[in-house]
Image (spheres, helix red, strand yellow):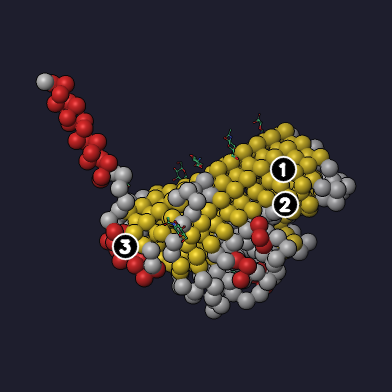
Amino acid sequence: MLNYCRYTLIFWALVACSTLCLADPSPECIVTEFSQLSDAIDNCLEIVVRNVTVPGGTTAEFKLKDGASLTFEGTTTFEHYDWPEWNLSLMRFEGNNITVEGASGHVLDGQGALYWDGIGDKGPPKPFFITIAVTNSILRNINLLNCPHHCTIINGSDGVTLTGWNIDCSHGDGNGGHNTDGFDVVHGNNVVIEDSTVVNQDDCVAVNQGFNMSFSGLRCSGSHGISLSVGFSKTSYIDNTVKNVTYSNCTLTHSSNAIHIKTHNDGGPGEITDVTYQDISFTDITSYGINIEQDYANGGPTGELVGNVPITNLQFYNIKGTVSSKAMPVYIYCADDACIGWNWSDIVISGGNQDSSCNYVPEGYTC
Ligand SMILES: *[C@@H]1O[C@H](CO)[C@@H](O)[C@H](O)[C@H]1NC(C)=O
Ligand SMILES: *[C@@H]1O[C@H](CO)[C@@H](O)[C@H](O)[C@H]1NC(C)=O
Ligand SMILES: *[C@@H]1O[C@H](CO)[C@@H](O)[C@H](O)[C@H]1NC(C)=O
Ligand SMILES: *[C@@H]1O[C@H](CO)[C@@H](O)[C@H](O)[C@H]1NC(C)=O
Ligand SMILES: *[C@@H]1O[C@H](CO)[C@@H](O)[C@H](O)[C@H]1NC(C)=O
Ligand SMILES: *[C@@H]1O[C@H](CO)[C@@H](O)[C@H](O)[C@H]1NC(C)=O
Ligand SMILES: *[C@@H]1O[C@H](CO)[C@@H](O)[C@H](O)[C@H]1NC(C)=O
Ligand SMILES: *[C@@H]1O[C@H](CO)[C@@H](O)[C@H](O)[C@H]1NC(C)=O
């Protein structure tokens, strides 16, 4: 009798769960037209966005309820538009403790080819694909196709994990794709990006500001490297401190740099402290295996060193790769007393017909 009750209970628990736990959310929470989105966002904790077209010139605002989840299914297409200004996005996520994910086979299509002109930032305004301003949230298994400009901007997030992303701007190769950064941390603390693939035409990841970040298991192709870019003069950069960042277990191929750290001599002040790169491997690097310069301004090196953003405690372990024939394995160009306490070991970079050049030599490394 006792067993009978137990099994009956388990049976009804399973029936209840199969309807409550596994079923689709209620119909009003399944968005199949863009016009249904804002109601769903205001009323639902579980939202499905299925085969939706976002009208041109609109930022799809996903300002989700606390604890809400949202799943993309099918193809989400973003219509082309001549955006009037920079720094606007095709979509924006806000919320606390939210979960955003892509169902198997989904794609978010930015229709980048309609914007690509080979000059990116220097041409007419182009939208970012996604801006993320969340706390304690996860965004996983997202497939981005053909970003018009920078793909993912983390700005004003604290506690965010991006995992299982696949960013594919490979169509931009030879077709004008430019400044298609994979992930930019413009301002964020406690950021994790892991197990993701980026095929693009600018930085795979670039960090501008923030504390406590971990980037691991990234596979980058076509990029400008896994980067730090700190000390911009732009007014939107409220401070210029980067502290406690780790890049580990990343592979790069077919890129201009593998590791790139640049500080901007016309902005700041700021600092880069406690940054580790470990277990990084690369092939087919066309400019520099490792490139660290304190002379950038307006997107390029100027030759003019300024120590406005000192780099302290930069740890490199187990960095292995090959650079192509015209490249330089390691280039370190530091302002006076602005590179402090670097400790490198197990750095093996082959190829390249230019000798490495270092005006500061890290402990444990022979340039
Ligand atoms: C986050 O949201 C989930 C799903 O709504 C909920 O179960 C969980 O308790 C929330 N966590 C916190 C810390 O609020
Ligand atoms: C999205 O639309 C395509 C083409 O009409 C269809 O094959 C697919 O089943 C749809 N996806 C979903 C999740 O409904
Ligand atoms: C960085 O992480 C440490 C350790 O978890 C934490 O104490 C500190 O508050 C974090 N910093 C920020 C700015 O969140
Ligand atoms: C550095 O950041 C990591 C998360 O990436 C965190 O676990 C660790 O506690 C932080 N360390 C310090 C000293 O804040
Ligand atoms: C390194 O990253 C790859 C993904 O590129 C992952 O499959 C592997 O498990 C990671 N290894 C470690 C030791 O984390
Ligand atoms: C973004 O906005 C900042 C500040 O408004 C501006 O300086 C910058 O030129 C804009 N464009 C880009 C591509 O960052
Ligand atoms: C980051 O967010 C700040 C504050 O909202 C804003 O002023 C700035 O323009 C944003 N930067 C980018 C690159 O979006
Ligand atoms: C450099 O790193 C090695 C290996 O982790 C360690 O033994 C050594 O103490 C470090 N040196 C400095 C100056 O931090």
Q: Which mark is residue 293?
A: none
Image quadrant in which the N terminus is located: top left
| 68 to the left or right of 208 | left
The residue positioned farthest toward the right in the image shown: 353
Q: Label 3: state its secondary structure.
A: helix
Disc 3 C-beta below 8 A from ligand 2:
no
**Residue 27 location (% of width, % of height):** 29, 59
> Which residue: 43% across, 67% down?
60
Residue denoted by label 1: 282
Image quadrant in which the C terminus is located: top right
> Which residue: 65% across, 69% down?
116
For the residue pair 203 and 334, the one nearer the viewer reads as 203
Residue type (three-letter) at the residue carrying disc 3: Ala
Q: Which mark is residue 255?
A: 2
Q: Quadrant of residue 232?
A: bottom right
Residue type (three-letter) at the residue carrying disc 1: Phe
In 3D space, how far apart are the residues under numbered discs 3 and 2 (Cα atoms)?
42 Å
For the residue pair 345 and 28, the one nearer the viewer reads as 28
> Can you see residue 284?
yes
> Which residue: 19% across, 27% down?
7
**Residue 261 location (% of width, % of height):** 67, 52
**Disc nearest the viewer among 3 and 2:** 3
Q: Which mark is residue 40?
A: 3
| 360 to the left or right of 90 | right
Going from the N terminus, do you reach mark 3 or mark 2 first?
3
Residue type (three-letter) at the residue carrying disc 2: Ser
**Residue 311 location (% of width, % of height):** 65, 49
Label 1 close to label 2 by CB (< 8 Å): yes
Q: Label 1: state its secondary structure.
A: strand
| 315 to the left or right of 130 | right
Q: In the image, is residue 25 above or below residue 111?
A: above
| 208 to the left or right of 257 | left
